[in-house]
Image (cartoon, coloured by chain):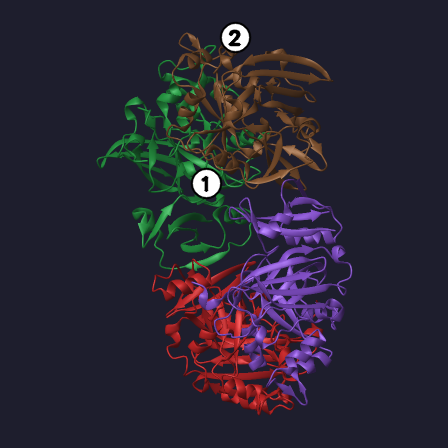
Chain colours: A purple, B red, C brown, D green
Amino acid sequence: MMKIFRVIRRGYYICYGIVGNQVIRLDEDPIRALIRYYENREILGDKVNGLDYQMLLSKFEINGMKITKPLDPPEVWGSGITYEIARDRYSAEGNIAQIADKTIYEAVYDDERPEIFFKGNANRCVGHGEAIVIRSDSEWTVPEPELAVVLDSNGKILGYTIMDDVSARDIEAKNPLYLPQSKIYIGCCAFGPFIASPDEVENPYNLDIILKIYRDNMIVCESTTSTRKMRRKIEEQIKYLTRDNSIPDGTILTTGTGIALSKDKGLKHGDVVEISISKLGTLITPVLRRDNIKS
Amino acid sequence: MMKIFRVIRRGYYICYGIVGNQVIRLDEDPIRALIRYYENREILGDKVNGLDYQMLLSKFEINGMKITKPLDPPEVWGSGITYEIARDRYSAEGNIAQIADKTIYEAVYDDERPEIFFKGNANRCVGHGEAIVIRSDSEWTVPEPELAVVLDSNGKILGYTIMDDVSARDIEAKNPLYLPQSKIYIGCCAFGPFIASPDEVENPYNLDIILKIYRDNMIVCESTTSTRKMRRKIEEQIKYLTRDNSIPDGTILTTGTGIALSKDKGLKHGDVVEISISKLGTLITPVLRRDNIKS
Amino acid sequence: MMKIFRVIRRGYYICYGIVGNQVIRLDEDPIRALIRYYENREILGDKVNGLDYQMLLSKFEINGMKITKPLDPPEVWGSGITYEIARDRYSAEGNIAQIADKTIYEAVYDDERPEIFFKGNANRCVGHGEAIVIRSDSEWTVPEPELAVVLDSNGKILGYTIMDDVSARDIEAKNPLYLPQSKIYIGCCAFGPFIASPDEVENPYNLDIILKIYRDNMIVCESTTSTRKMRRKIEEQIKYLTRDNSIPDGTILTTGTGIALSKDKGLKHGDVVEISISKLGTLITPVLRRDNIKS
Amino acid sequence: MMKIFRVIRRGYYICYGIVGNQVIRLDEDPIRALIRYYENREILGDKVNGLDYQMLLSKFEINGMKITKPLDPPEVWGSGITYEIARDRYSAEGNIAQIADKTIYEAVYDDERPEIFFKGNANRCVGHGEAIVIRSDSEWTVPEPELAVVLDSNGKILGYTIMDDVSARDIEAKNPLYLPQSKIYIGCCAFGPFIASPDEVENPYNLDIILKIYRDNMIVCESTTSTRKMRRKIEEQIKYLTRDNSIPDGTILTTGTGIALSKDKGLKHGDVVEISISKLGTLITPVLRRDNIKS
């Protein structure tokens, strides 16, 4: 049982594991450490004292040590319409593309082949306490709170984490050919606050997911779901991701959203998004709108 | 006026430029050399003799020197439905997704926002003489012969090349949400044989594109188009690619196909694809079907 | 006040500092950490618990963690005849080179210019618990227990340590032109077990030095001296080392021996050498004779 | 038959080989290229035209390309008193250290064991056209024109070159314990202009060595010798250098001087030293006195 997190201290990344209540400073980078753990090899590192992990999670920064994304994924991929509610809510938007007598969401939900899409790479992702982004040309951007898996190059699951597959829903809804623009941009993705080893999670199909959006310190949106409702098994998603495709160690796959916010629930500049998943903690990120960012 | 190509010799990449008829062995990696040229700075390298470039292009390998992709793009992106024929032919397939009364292809063609999609990165691309791939689960994979641009991180055009945006058309046509699976896999993309500096090309909207597919040494498909027919200007595509998105130096954007092969024109294992574009030479690649590849 | 030591764990070097009784796992390599400390900047690292430093020093290896030399010096230099006893004992050997009416040792002791010699680099040095070497062609090799300083590239003293300037005395005594062969070879130098910051030592001219040689678990030689007897001030040695010469950060200068063993006190294969200096701990090294080493 | 030289162009080192009259731009660093040649493997590189090597040697810099030392030796070692004239001339200085009834130079010349000393590393060496240095505290510094060998880590001879073992003779003569200070400092060593493969030289014991010193464009010193007069065979020197010692690939050993200038022949600031050895070309270096160098 191990949780991995990472901090920035004076410009250096430093990676830690938590085993029981003991914080271990890892000798290796987080992807190697997860592989080592997966192979049942000894965790290499030092027992650290005085690092108050709970305080770090709640304050984001203590003693010149700032929490950040737990690893640098070389690639991030997503799965879509893996929950019935996504099929239904997405299909209920006006003017959704139809194939024969189904919306494209109904069609993919009913089909054998899942939707798999590219979501970006490390430099488009942020971690706990770092800002996710609303594109300058989107009026309706939503968080998509999801269970994500960290994979090795063979598609083996090295760990689990919370991922926010932030999506410009208006761009995506207008034409499915705009999906990459709705999904891939700077700040389109948050994950963390830590990676849990598979034995921390045990059963990934029995986890509660809670989304809260704060605006002016008030909760303006709260919604819950459970991975019990995931229709596509994670292994099935991985099978399609890796079919005739090769992925590097540390690739993240996010497994689709079970919470689909309506048009009036879009994010606004200054909001704070809080996503909790059983056993995976709480990922908190402020929201910036692109035209409010000085570039 | 400079053309850049790259070879593998004893496991090392070596990069050359051609200025006039003189082959220059470049001191720098190809992306830096293109940036230097763009900035009107002197090309750094040695004049080489005895390297028969035309022979290398026609034989792929001479004297233990094998031609390969001219650079390693950190990201490759594509544009879709930038030619009228793509809108029409794609729309004419049976059961294409509709939005209101248009197919998604008609809708994107008529809309202000272009289709932009992620196509992969260096390790999914091949060069001149190297094999492109048919996915094991596709019965209808086609070459898409396109003009491509090499960009710097600001979206400036550093050079032009031929790109083959190989696509599993059956997977894409079934549901637009399958587009990433039809577009991104190992061997999904070929480019080369060289990168031409912008002044080699002058007007990118006046180039002829010729596609030939050989099977058992016979031409089984031949088709031509011209970039005159490109509806979306390249600058417009770049504008959307880089909007709220950041790309690294050396990113390639391929500008959409003007040749859309029908279902009976799919590639088969053992075919050879030959794409010529005015001023950009001829890119030749054999075709492998994934289930014929020993992994 | 900081002591730095270094271990090998599964093939990785890891560096620690001790501040008070607290072990700190350093974020930086030991040379940078010493420079940072010298500049009165904060020590970067994590407080470690459960690492029993005293046990590590006495057992050399615990829990798959082996102590080794505390840093990799790019260059090691030595000073000679800085104690009166070295002048006298060295001069008393038979057939010592004479200049006018003095031995070369008397001449250098009396002269303004000190003896400075190159002693090797990291790959010729060993640390606490690692073997020093007797050359295959020497019958009289001795330990020279010395106070050493770690320098930055300006010659500032970053720290102090124990160094054993192992010397093939018979080769050196035969002809001073053989000095490099008596001084520089694989295993010619040991230092450690840690580097002490200057404030740990305060006054480097008031330190006791004790040498013990064990053979078959018996003490066969024991000798003591004190840095009070050092005639050449360390700053003077550094002045000559760096005159018209440039040294890299982390260079070590060893300041000359105050214990000069006679011919019957030479090291033998299987001996253990133990050197203690006040405030700098005890450096213990086994002794191997080169012809007993399988290469 | 290959000669290797190296240039700096816009801050990059680039290495060339000459085979026949053809200049080859080497794919590898010079040490690897010499090893490859030694192993009778094909030289990897491109045939270059328009690089006028003779012009480069005579002008030092053409077309923004400056000749420099042909490789970066990790270590440089020297041999002493390998010619009878060195024994005699060195011994004839006043007040030379005596062992029994011989000077130390006579003793080492007559003894089985040669003198081997550390001379520095790449950052203390200069190349053709670059300045050698007179220490600020020396009144009598001389060039020592020598045949040098480039060695691999097993002591095999990979190539030959000219080396100038610049020496502060007054410091060395005062006391042999000062030898390192007379031999090792910034600018103490020049070599080049190229490295010749062993088959270029064939017999290293039949090479003429000519030294010329220019002052105000006049020859103020001219002296010649031949490697025929070298008493110590090079293999014998290498045997002692590598006995119980390990050296890295690319180490240079300089084989001792056969020209020993008297006190009135010392170098002065502004002199130019020119050393020619049969088959190894001519190495030309200006002379700077340290106190005339702004640091």
- Chain ID, mark 1: D
The foreground one among D79 and C3 is: C3
- Chain ID, mark 2: C
Q: Which residue is mark 2?
A: C92
Q: Which residue is mark 1?
A: D160
Image coordinates for residue D93, horizontal then vertical, percent: 35, 17
**Marks 2 & 1, CB-CB < 8 Å contact:** no
The quadrant holding residue A224 is: bottom right
Please say whether residue B223 is visible from this viewpoint: yes
Residue A202, relative to residue C269: is it above or below? below
Cα gap from disc 2 to disc 1, whole angstroms:
43 Å
How many labels, in total? 2
Q: Quadrant of the C terminus of chain A?
A: bottom left
Label 1: which secondary element: strand
Image coordinates for residue A124, horizontal then vertical, percent: 54, 63
The foreground one among D230 and B241 is: B241
- Pair 2/1: label in front: 2
| Residue under the point 69% across and 65% down | A209
Please say whether residue B52 is visible from this viewpoint: no
A247 to the left or right of B50: right
Residue B6, relative to residue D134: is it above or below? below
* Three-letter residue code for mark 2: Ala
The local crowd at label 2, few if under 14, some if 14 to 19, many if 20 or more residues have their Cα within 10 Å, is few
Labels 2, 1: one chain: no
Residue A106, relative to residue D186: is it above or below? below
| Residue under the point 64% across and 88% down | B263
Label 2: which secondary element: helix
Image coordinates for residue C187, horizontal then vertical, percent: 60, 28
The foreground one among C233 and A45 is: A45
* Three-letter residue code for mark 1: Tyr
The foreground one among A250 and A148 is: A148
Name the mark on residue B266. Answer: none
